[in-house]
Amino acid sequence: MAISLTEELKKPVPFSGHDVPDDDLLRDCVHCGMCLPTCPTYRMTGQEASSPRGRLWLMKSVADGRLSLLDPEFDEQMYQCLNCRACEAVCPSGVQYGPLVEASRAQLEQHRPRPLWQRLTREVALAWPFQDVKRMRAGATFLRLYQKSGVSSVLRKTGVLRMLRLENLERMVPPIDEAPMVPGKETWRPGNATRGEAHVFSGCVMSSVFPGVNRATGRVLAHNGYDTDVPAGQQCCGALFSHTGSLDDARKLARTNIDAFEKAGSGPIVVNAAGCGSALKEYGHLLKDDPEYAQRAREFSARVKDVSEILADGGFETPTHEVPGSVTYQEPCHLAHAQRITAAPRTLLASVPGLKLVEMKESSLCCGSAGIYNIIRREMADDLGDRKAANIADTHADQVVTANPGCHMQLRTSLIRNGEEMPVRHIVEILDEAYGGKRTADRGEWAVDRPQA
Protein backbone atom coordinates (compact mmCIF):
# COMPACT_ATOMS: atom_id res chain seq x y z
CA MET A 1 0.00 0.00 0.00
CA ALA A 2 1.39 3.40 -0.97
CA ILE A 3 2.11 5.80 1.88
CA SER A 4 1.11 9.42 1.29
CA LEU A 5 3.52 12.26 1.88
CA THR A 6 1.26 13.54 4.68
CA GLU A 7 1.48 10.19 6.47
CA GLU A 8 5.22 10.08 5.90
CA LEU A 9 5.67 13.53 7.47
CA LYS A 10 3.90 12.35 10.61
CA LYS A 11 6.89 10.11 11.28
CA PRO A 12 9.66 11.99 13.11
CA VAL A 13 12.61 11.86 10.70
CA PRO A 14 15.58 13.06 12.80
CA PHE A 15 19.00 14.35 11.89
CA SER A 16 21.29 11.42 11.13
CA GLY A 17 24.44 10.45 9.28
CA HIS A 18 27.28 12.92 8.95
CA ASP A 19 27.19 16.73 9.23
CA VAL A 20 24.53 16.73 11.94
CA PRO A 21 23.97 20.20 13.47
CA ASP A 22 25.92 20.39 16.73
CA ASP A 23 23.47 20.13 19.63
CA ASP A 24 25.69 22.18 21.92
CA LEU A 25 25.70 25.01 19.36
CA LEU A 26 21.92 24.79 19.07
CA ARG A 27 21.56 25.19 22.83
CA ASP A 28 23.58 28.44 22.79
CA CYS A 29 20.54 30.38 21.52
CA VAL A 30 18.54 31.93 24.40
CA HIS A 31 15.85 33.32 22.06
CA CYS A 32 16.46 36.90 23.18
CA GLY A 33 15.41 38.35 19.81
CA MET A 34 18.33 40.72 19.31
CA CYS A 35 18.92 39.11 15.91
CA LEU A 36 15.47 40.00 14.56
CA PRO A 37 16.08 43.57 13.31
CA THR A 38 19.34 42.54 11.61
CA CYS A 39 17.84 39.66 9.61
CA PRO A 40 16.96 40.57 5.99
CA THR A 41 14.24 37.95 5.57
CA TYR A 42 12.58 38.89 8.86
CA ARG A 43 12.74 42.55 7.86
CA MET A 44 11.02 41.73 4.57
CA THR A 45 8.38 39.26 5.84
CA GLY A 46 7.86 40.10 9.52
CA GLN A 47 7.42 36.38 10.22
CA GLU A 48 9.02 34.73 13.25
CA ALA A 49 9.88 31.59 11.28
CA SER A 50 11.87 33.77 8.85
CA SER A 51 14.20 34.96 11.62
CA PRO A 52 17.39 33.35 12.95
CA ARG A 53 15.62 32.65 16.25
CA GLY A 54 12.75 30.98 14.42
CA ARG A 55 15.04 28.87 12.27
CA LEU A 56 17.09 27.77 15.27
CA TRP A 57 13.83 26.70 16.94
CA LEU A 58 13.04 24.60 13.87
CA MET A 59 16.49 22.99 13.94
CA LYS A 60 16.12 22.20 17.64
CA SER A 61 12.67 20.75 17.00
CA VAL A 62 14.11 18.33 14.43
CA ALA A 63 16.98 17.46 16.76
CA ASP A 64 14.53 16.73 19.60
CA GLY A 65 12.15 14.69 17.42
CA ARG A 66 9.29 17.20 17.56
CA LEU A 67 9.50 18.03 13.84
CA SER A 68 10.39 15.92 10.84
CA LEU A 69 13.49 16.75 8.83
CA LEU A 70 11.27 16.33 5.75
CA ASP A 71 8.71 18.90 6.87
CA PRO A 72 8.23 21.44 4.03
CA GLU A 73 8.42 24.36 6.47
CA PHE A 74 11.84 23.25 7.64
CA ASP A 75 13.06 22.92 4.06
CA GLU A 76 11.62 26.33 3.12
CA GLN A 77 13.19 28.19 6.03
CA MET A 78 16.63 26.62 5.74
CA TYR A 79 16.82 27.76 2.12
CA GLN A 80 14.96 31.04 2.48
CA CYS A 81 17.81 32.16 4.74
CA LEU A 82 20.49 34.18 2.92
CA ASN A 83 23.17 32.96 5.38
CA CYS A 84 24.37 36.56 5.59
CA ARG A 85 25.53 36.02 9.20
CA ALA A 86 24.21 39.41 10.38
CA CYS A 87 22.64 37.62 13.35
CA GLU A 88 26.04 36.35 14.49
CA ALA A 89 27.48 39.85 14.66
CA VAL A 90 24.87 41.01 17.20
CA CYS A 91 24.23 37.80 19.14
CA PRO A 92 25.12 38.23 22.85
CA SER A 93 25.36 34.43 23.25
CA GLY A 94 27.80 33.98 20.37
CA VAL A 95 25.59 31.55 18.46
CA GLN A 96 27.46 30.12 15.45
CA TYR A 97 24.50 30.32 13.11
CA GLY A 98 26.40 29.82 9.83
CA PRO A 99 27.72 26.31 10.57
CA LEU A 100 24.29 25.29 11.90
CA VAL A 101 22.32 26.32 8.81
CA GLU A 102 24.93 24.78 6.50
CA ALA A 103 24.76 21.49 8.43
CA SER A 104 20.95 21.59 8.27
CA ARG A 105 21.08 22.02 4.51
CA ALA A 106 23.55 19.14 4.29
CA GLN A 107 21.04 16.99 6.18
CA LEU A 108 18.32 17.94 3.71
CA GLU A 109 20.54 17.05 0.77
CA GLN A 110 21.37 13.67 2.34
CA HIS A 111 17.83 12.62 3.23
CA ARG A 112 15.43 14.50 0.96
CA PRO A 113 14.95 13.02 -2.53
CA ARG A 114 15.23 15.69 -5.22
CA PRO A 115 13.43 15.41 -8.57
CA LEU A 116 15.63 14.49 -11.52
CA TRP A 117 15.41 17.98 -13.06
CA GLN A 118 16.67 19.57 -9.84
CA ARG A 119 19.58 17.12 -9.60
CA LEU A 120 20.54 17.83 -13.20
CA THR A 121 20.24 21.60 -12.69
CA ARG A 122 22.51 21.50 -9.63
CA GLU A 123 25.03 19.37 -11.50
CA VAL A 124 25.13 21.60 -14.59
CA ALA A 125 24.82 25.02 -12.94
CA LEU A 126 26.75 24.43 -9.71
CA ALA A 127 28.89 21.31 -9.56
CA TRP A 128 30.37 21.22 -13.06
CA PRO A 129 31.61 24.84 -13.43
CA PHE A 130 32.79 25.33 -9.84
CA GLN A 131 34.59 22.02 -9.32
CA ASP A 132 37.35 23.10 -11.71
CA VAL A 133 38.15 26.77 -12.22
CA LYS A 134 39.41 26.01 -15.75
CA ARG A 135 35.79 25.55 -16.78
CA MET A 136 34.88 28.90 -15.27
CA ARG A 137 37.71 30.58 -17.19
CA ALA A 138 36.55 28.94 -20.42
CA GLY A 139 33.04 30.22 -19.81
CA ALA A 140 34.32 33.73 -19.12
CA THR A 141 36.36 33.68 -22.34
CA PHE A 142 33.19 32.78 -24.25
CA LEU A 143 31.25 35.58 -22.50
CA ARG A 144 34.01 38.05 -23.34
CA LEU A 145 33.77 37.15 -27.03
CA TYR A 146 29.96 37.27 -26.81
CA GLN A 147 30.11 40.80 -25.41
CA LYS A 148 32.75 42.13 -27.80
CA SER A 149 31.15 40.62 -30.91
CA GLY A 150 28.01 42.68 -30.46
CA VAL A 151 25.78 39.61 -30.21
CA SER A 152 24.72 40.55 -26.70
CA SER A 153 23.50 43.96 -27.88
CA VAL A 154 21.52 42.43 -30.74
CA LEU A 155 19.84 39.86 -28.48
CA ARG A 156 18.85 42.55 -25.99
CA LYS A 157 17.44 44.91 -28.62
CA THR A 158 15.46 42.19 -30.40
CA GLY A 159 13.95 40.92 -27.13
CA VAL A 160 15.35 37.40 -27.55
CA LEU A 161 16.87 37.40 -24.08
CA ARG A 162 13.59 38.51 -22.55
CA MET A 163 11.71 35.79 -24.42
CA LEU A 164 14.16 33.16 -23.15
CA ARG A 165 14.00 34.64 -19.62
CA LEU A 166 17.75 35.21 -19.67
CA GLU A 167 17.69 39.02 -19.56
CA ASN A 168 18.26 39.24 -15.81
CA LEU A 169 21.12 36.72 -15.85
CA GLU A 170 22.79 38.44 -18.81
CA ARG A 171 22.49 41.82 -17.12
CA MET A 172 24.37 40.58 -14.06
CA VAL A 173 27.59 40.01 -15.97
CA PRO A 174 29.69 43.19 -16.22
CA PRO A 175 31.84 43.94 -19.26
CA ILE A 176 34.79 41.52 -19.21
CA ASP A 177 37.67 43.64 -20.48
CA GLU A 178 40.65 41.43 -19.60
CA ALA A 179 41.68 37.84 -20.16
CA PRO A 180 41.05 35.50 -17.20
CA MET A 181 43.78 35.19 -14.60
CA VAL A 182 45.60 31.85 -14.63
CA PRO A 183 47.18 30.94 -11.26
CA GLY A 184 50.93 30.54 -11.43
CA LYS A 185 51.34 32.92 -14.37
CA GLU A 186 51.59 36.40 -12.83
CA THR A 187 53.68 38.07 -10.13
CA TRP A 188 54.12 41.62 -8.85
CA ARG A 189 57.33 42.77 -7.20
CA PRO A 190 57.93 46.01 -5.30
CA GLY A 191 60.47 48.41 -6.73
CA ASN A 192 62.12 49.03 -3.35
CA ALA A 193 62.18 47.50 0.15
CA THR A 194 59.91 44.48 0.62
CA ARG A 195 57.74 43.50 3.57
CA GLY A 196 57.86 39.86 2.56
CA GLU A 197 55.75 37.69 0.33
CA ALA A 198 51.98 37.64 -0.14
CA HIS A 199 49.91 35.12 -2.06
CA VAL A 200 46.72 36.15 -3.84
CA PHE A 201 43.75 33.81 -3.75
CA SER A 202 42.41 34.20 -7.28
CA GLY A 203 38.99 32.60 -6.80
CA CYS A 204 36.71 31.34 -9.55
CA VAL A 205 34.41 34.28 -10.38
CA MET A 206 37.10 36.85 -9.53
CA SER A 207 39.73 35.24 -11.75
CA SER A 208 37.35 34.83 -14.69
CA VAL A 209 34.73 37.61 -14.61
CA PHE A 210 36.74 40.19 -12.62
CA PRO A 211 40.40 39.46 -13.51
CA GLY A 212 41.17 43.18 -13.48
CA VAL A 213 40.35 43.32 -9.77
CA ASN A 214 42.82 40.52 -9.09
CA ARG A 215 45.54 42.33 -11.05
CA ALA A 216 44.75 45.58 -9.27
CA THR A 217 45.15 43.66 -6.00
CA GLY A 218 48.61 42.52 -7.07
CA ARG A 219 49.64 46.05 -7.99
CA VAL A 220 48.32 47.53 -4.72
CA LEU A 221 50.12 44.90 -2.64
CA ALA A 222 53.37 45.44 -4.57
CA HIS A 223 53.06 49.19 -4.13
CA ASN A 224 52.88 48.52 -0.40
CA GLY A 225 56.04 46.41 -0.39
CA TYR A 226 54.73 42.86 -0.81
CA ASP A 227 56.38 40.42 -3.19
CA THR A 228 53.14 39.04 -4.61
CA ASP A 229 52.20 35.97 -6.61
CA VAL A 230 49.15 33.86 -7.48
CA PRO A 231 49.99 30.26 -6.50
CA ALA A 232 49.37 27.54 -9.06
CA GLY A 233 47.03 24.66 -8.32
CA GLN A 234 44.37 26.62 -6.39
CA GLN A 235 40.67 26.14 -7.01
CA CYS A 236 37.30 27.63 -6.02
CA CYS A 237 37.05 28.30 -2.27
CA GLY A 238 34.04 25.98 -1.96
CA ALA A 239 31.68 28.55 -0.43
CA LEU A 240 28.85 27.87 -2.88
CA PHE A 241 29.00 24.15 -2.09
CA SER A 242 28.91 24.84 1.66
CA HIS A 243 25.95 27.18 1.23
CA THR A 244 23.97 24.58 -0.75
CA GLY A 245 24.57 21.66 1.61
CA SER A 246 27.27 19.94 -0.48
CA LEU A 247 29.86 19.94 2.29
CA ASP A 248 31.83 16.98 0.94
CA ASP A 249 32.43 18.84 -2.32
CA ALA A 250 33.52 21.90 -0.32
CA ARG A 251 36.00 19.73 1.61
CA LYS A 252 37.57 18.42 -1.60
CA LEU A 253 38.23 21.98 -2.78
CA ALA A 254 39.53 22.99 0.65
CA ARG A 255 42.12 20.20 0.62
CA THR A 256 43.25 21.21 -2.87
CA ASN A 257 43.70 24.84 -1.81
CA ILE A 258 45.57 23.91 1.36
CA ASP A 259 47.99 21.79 -0.69
CA ALA A 260 48.50 24.60 -3.23
CA PHE A 261 49.25 27.33 -0.70
CA GLU A 262 51.49 25.13 1.43
CA LYS A 263 53.65 24.60 -1.68
CA ALA A 264 53.70 28.36 -2.31
CA GLY A 265 55.55 29.05 0.95
CA SER A 266 54.82 31.20 3.94
CA GLY A 267 53.24 34.63 3.98
CA PRO A 268 49.65 35.83 4.13
CA ILE A 269 46.96 34.51 1.78
CA VAL A 270 45.28 37.67 0.49
CA VAL A 271 41.64 37.59 -0.61
CA ASN A 272 39.62 40.32 -2.34
CA ALA A 273 36.26 38.51 -2.32
CA ALA A 274 34.38 38.67 0.98
CA GLY A 275 32.58 35.36 0.48
CA CYS A 276 35.80 33.56 -0.37
CA GLY A 277 37.61 35.09 2.58
CA SER A 278 34.91 33.94 4.98
CA ALA A 279 34.99 30.40 3.58
CA LEU A 280 38.79 30.19 3.68
CA LYS A 281 38.90 31.42 7.27
CA GLU A 282 36.48 28.61 8.21
CA TYR A 283 38.46 25.72 6.73
CA GLY A 284 39.45 24.80 10.29
CA HIS A 285 35.82 24.07 11.10
CA LEU A 286 35.05 22.48 7.73
CA LEU A 287 37.89 19.94 8.10
CA LYS A 288 37.84 19.56 11.89
CA ASP A 289 37.15 15.82 11.64
CA ASP A 290 39.80 15.12 8.97
CA PRO A 291 42.83 13.59 10.73
CA GLU A 292 45.21 14.50 7.91
CA TYR A 293 44.00 18.07 7.28
CA ALA A 294 42.48 19.35 10.55
CA GLN A 295 45.65 21.01 11.88
CA ARG A 296 46.79 22.09 8.43
CA ALA A 297 43.36 23.68 7.84
CA ARG A 298 43.63 25.70 11.06
CA GLU A 299 47.10 26.91 10.06
CA PHE A 300 45.87 27.77 6.57
CA SER A 301 42.91 29.77 7.91
CA ALA A 302 45.17 31.71 10.25
CA ARG A 303 47.08 33.00 7.21
CA VAL A 304 44.02 34.32 5.36
CA LYS A 305 43.60 38.11 5.23
CA ASP A 306 41.19 40.29 3.32
CA VAL A 307 43.09 42.80 1.21
CA SER A 308 41.63 45.73 3.17
CA GLU A 309 42.52 43.99 6.42
CA ILE A 310 46.19 43.40 5.57
CA LEU A 311 46.65 46.96 4.31
CA ALA A 312 44.91 48.73 7.19
CA ASP A 313 46.40 46.56 9.92
CA GLY A 314 49.93 46.54 8.54
CA GLY A 315 50.12 50.21 7.65
CA PHE A 316 49.77 51.31 4.05
CA GLU A 317 51.36 53.87 1.78
CA THR A 318 49.19 56.98 1.53
CA PRO A 319 47.90 57.30 -2.05
CA THR A 320 49.10 60.40 -3.92
CA HIS A 321 46.96 60.38 -7.08
CA GLU A 322 43.67 62.21 -6.82
CA VAL A 323 40.43 60.34 -7.49
CA PRO A 324 37.85 63.14 -7.69
CA GLY A 325 34.21 62.60 -6.84
CA SER A 326 32.18 60.77 -4.23
CA VAL A 327 31.56 57.12 -3.42
CA THR A 328 29.24 55.20 -1.14
CA TYR A 329 30.30 51.89 0.35
CA GLN A 330 28.10 48.78 0.32
CA GLU A 331 29.31 46.33 2.97
CA PRO A 332 29.40 42.70 1.82
CA CYS A 333 27.75 40.50 4.44
CA HIS A 334 30.64 38.07 4.69
CA LEU A 335 33.11 40.88 5.22
CA ALA A 336 31.08 42.87 7.77
CA HIS A 337 29.30 40.05 9.62
CA ALA A 338 31.31 36.85 9.14
CA GLN A 339 34.79 38.42 9.18
CA ARG A 340 33.80 41.49 11.26
CA ILE A 341 35.80 43.84 9.01
CA THR A 342 34.01 47.18 8.80
CA ALA A 343 36.52 49.94 9.61
CA ALA A 344 39.38 48.94 7.28
CA PRO A 345 37.60 49.61 3.94
CA ARG A 346 36.45 53.02 5.17
CA THR A 347 39.96 53.88 6.38
CA LEU A 348 41.39 53.07 2.97
CA LEU A 349 38.74 55.02 1.07
CA ALA A 350 39.19 58.03 3.38
CA SER A 351 42.90 58.12 2.53
CA VAL A 352 42.33 58.68 -1.21
CA PRO A 353 42.94 62.32 -2.24
CA GLY A 354 39.90 64.06 -3.70
CA LEU A 355 37.50 61.25 -2.81
CA LYS A 356 34.48 61.85 -0.59
CA LEU A 357 32.88 58.89 1.21
CA VAL A 358 29.10 59.25 1.64
CA GLU A 359 27.57 56.68 3.98
CA MET A 360 24.38 54.99 2.84
CA LYS A 361 21.45 53.84 4.93
CA GLU A 362 21.51 50.11 5.79
CA SER A 363 24.95 49.67 4.24
CA SER A 364 25.39 46.25 5.86
CA LEU A 365 21.92 44.88 5.08
CA CYS A 366 22.20 42.04 2.56
CA CYS A 367 21.82 43.12 -1.07
CA GLY A 368 20.21 39.79 -2.01
CA SER A 369 23.12 38.19 -3.85
CA ALA A 370 24.03 35.45 -1.33
CA GLY A 371 25.86 33.12 -3.71
CA ILE A 372 23.23 31.88 -6.18
CA TYR A 373 20.26 33.08 -4.09
CA ASN A 374 19.50 35.84 -6.61
CA ILE A 375 19.08 33.14 -9.26
CA ILE A 376 17.07 30.51 -7.38
CA ARG A 377 15.02 32.91 -5.20
CA ARG A 378 14.71 35.89 -7.44
CA GLU A 379 11.64 37.53 -5.84
CA MET A 380 13.20 38.00 -2.39
CA ALA A 381 16.57 38.85 -3.95
CA ASP A 382 15.01 41.51 -6.18
CA ASP A 383 13.14 43.03 -3.23
CA LEU A 384 16.39 43.33 -1.28
CA GLY A 385 18.23 44.58 -4.37
CA ASP A 386 15.61 47.27 -4.97
CA ARG A 387 15.87 48.36 -1.34
CA LYS A 388 19.66 48.58 -1.66
CA ALA A 389 19.44 50.48 -4.96
CA ALA A 390 17.12 53.07 -3.37
CA ASN A 391 19.50 53.57 -0.47
CA ILE A 392 22.42 53.98 -2.87
CA ALA A 393 20.53 56.51 -4.99
CA ASP A 394 19.64 58.53 -1.90
CA THR A 395 23.35 59.23 -1.28
CA HIS A 396 23.73 60.99 -4.67
CA ALA A 397 27.25 59.54 -4.83
CA ASP A 398 29.04 59.23 -8.17
CA GLN A 399 29.74 55.53 -7.75
CA VAL A 400 29.24 52.65 -5.33
CA VAL A 401 32.10 50.57 -3.96
CA THR A 402 31.94 47.01 -2.66
CA ALA A 403 34.32 44.11 -1.98
CA ASN A 404 32.66 40.96 -3.30
CA PRO A 405 31.91 39.79 -6.86
CA GLY A 406 28.41 38.54 -6.05
CA CYS A 407 27.51 41.88 -4.48
CA HIS A 408 29.01 43.67 -7.49
CA MET A 409 26.77 41.78 -9.92
CA GLN A 410 23.67 42.12 -7.74
CA LEU A 411 24.20 45.87 -7.26
CA ARG A 412 24.78 46.37 -10.98
CA THR A 413 21.57 44.51 -11.84
CA SER A 414 19.49 46.23 -9.17
CA LEU A 415 20.68 49.71 -10.10
CA ILE A 416 19.96 49.16 -13.81
CA ARG A 417 16.51 47.76 -13.00
CA ASN A 418 15.77 50.89 -10.99
CA GLY A 419 16.96 53.28 -13.67
CA GLU A 420 20.30 54.13 -12.05
CA GLU A 421 23.45 54.01 -14.17
CA MET A 422 25.88 54.43 -11.27
CA PRO A 423 29.20 52.57 -11.76
CA VAL A 424 29.98 49.72 -9.36
CA ARG A 425 33.64 49.22 -8.43
CA HIS A 426 35.76 47.16 -6.09
CA ILE A 427 37.60 49.06 -3.37
CA VAL A 428 40.92 47.76 -4.75
CA GLU A 429 40.20 49.40 -8.10
CA ILE A 430 39.87 52.76 -6.33
CA LEU A 431 43.15 52.23 -4.46
CA ASP A 432 44.92 51.08 -7.61
CA GLU A 433 43.85 54.25 -9.39
CA ALA A 434 44.97 56.33 -6.40
CA TYR A 435 48.40 54.69 -6.54
CA GLY A 436 48.73 55.37 -10.26
CA GLY A 437 47.54 52.00 -11.57
CA LYS A 438 49.38 50.44 -14.47
CA ARG A 439 51.20 53.71 -15.16
CA THR A 440 53.46 53.21 -12.15
CA ALA A 441 55.16 50.26 -13.86
CA ASP A 442 56.59 52.62 -16.47
CA ARG A 443 58.30 54.61 -13.71
CA GLY A 444 59.75 51.54 -12.03
CA GLU A 445 57.69 51.86 -8.85
CA TRP A 446 56.83 48.18 -9.12
CA ALA A 447 57.52 45.44 -11.64
CA VAL A 448 55.10 42.88 -13.02
CA ASP A 449 55.70 39.64 -14.84
CA ARG A 450 53.19 39.79 -17.68
CA PRO A 451 50.83 36.84 -18.35
CA GLN A 452 52.37 34.19 -20.55
CA ALA A 453 50.82 33.82 -23.97
Image (spheres, helix red, strand yellow):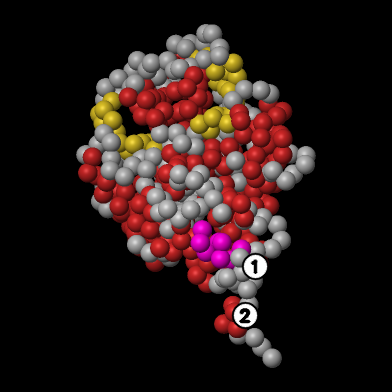
Label disc, if present, on residue 275 of the rendered structure:
none
Q: Nearer the viewer, residue 379 or 222?
A: 379
Q: Say which quadrant the C terminus sits in.
A: top right
Residue at the (31%, 45%) spot, across then down: 362
Image-based side of 98 in relation to 347, left or right: right
Residue 121 image offset from top left, x and y in percent: 58, 63
- Residue 58 within the segment the image draws in magenta: yes
Q: Say which quadrant the N terminus sits in.
A: bottom right
SS label for mark 1: loop
Q: Nearer the viewer, mark 2 or mark 1?
A: 1
Residue with the mark numbered 2: 8
Residue 264 position (above or below residue 10): above
SS label for mark 2: helix
Label disc, if present, on residue 14 of the rendered structure:
1
Residue 132 image offset from top left, x and y in percent: 65, 46
* Quadrant in the picture for residue 229: top right
The answer to whether residue 152 is visible is: no
Identity of the amino acid at label 1? Answer: Pro
The answer to whether residue 308 is visible is: yes
Identity of the amino acid at label 2? Answer: Glu
